[in-house]
Amino acid sequence: MEVWKKHIKLGNRCFGNEHYLDAEREYRSALTRSKQLFHAWLDHDEAVWSLIVSYQNLADLLDKQNQSEQAITLLQELNQTLTDTLQQLACSVPSDEERQMAIRRGLRSSYAHMLNMQRKSHGACTSTDSTHSDNLVFGELV
């Protein structure tokens, strides 16, 4: 968990300083780490939100570099990962309600983020505000 946080914080710092190649490297490292730990973490909310923050920060970075289609594809991958995991859990016995609830909460957030990015990339949204989560770790500023 601490390694993941380190990568996210460094990525956020690089993003803020417009060092996009370094930010991408850190976000990809964070994403790799969160994928490795996703099914092993005991705190289900932490597991889900680490995955979401990793994907969303990387997608925001790609979008910032005018790579909107790649960013949207990345967010679709996130949603598919969460949906697949939720379906697997629904079929498991005994049912893991806490994990399912954490994933459902995460899906709502990640789906909304993806829709906002799609609207922005297709010109439906005229705002130039970035949706990037500066220093976001589990919904809190660090």
Image (spheres, grey):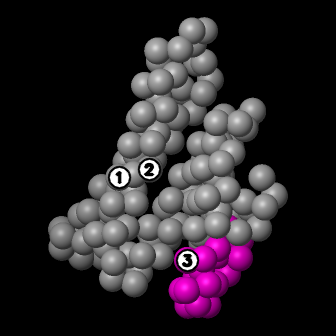
Secondary structure type for disc 1 = helix
Question: In the rendered image, is residue 104 in sight?
Answer: no
The quadrant of the rendering that contains the C terminus is bottom right
Residue 125, given in percent of the width and then of the height, sits at: 24, 70
Secondary structure type for disc 2 = helix
Q: Which residue is mark 2?
A: 78
Q: Horizontally, is 36 left or right of 20 in the view?
A: right
Q: CA distance from mark 2 to mark 3?
A: 17 Å
Q: Amino acid at mark 2?
A: Leu
Magenta stretch: residue 12 in it? yes
Q: Horizontally, is 131 left or right of 101 in the view?
A: left
- Against 40, residue 142 (above or below) is below
Q: CA distance from mark 1 to mark 2?
A: 5 Å
Magenta stretch: residue 91 in it? no
Q: Horizontally, is 100 left or right of 118 in the view?
A: right
Secondary structure type for disc 3 = helix
Quick check: marks 1 and 2 in contact, CB under 8 Å? yes
Q: Nearer the viewer, residue 29 or 139?
A: 29
Label of residue 76 in the image: 1
- Against 16, residue 29 (above or below) is above
Question: In the rendered image, is residue 90 in sight?
Answer: yes
* Residue 25, quarter of the rendered image: bottom right
Callout 1: few (<14), some (14-19), or many (20+) C-alpha neighbours within 10 Å?
some
Q: Residue at x 47, y 18 (%)?
A: 90
Q: Which residue is mark 3?
A: 24
Q: Amino acid at mark 3?
A: Glu
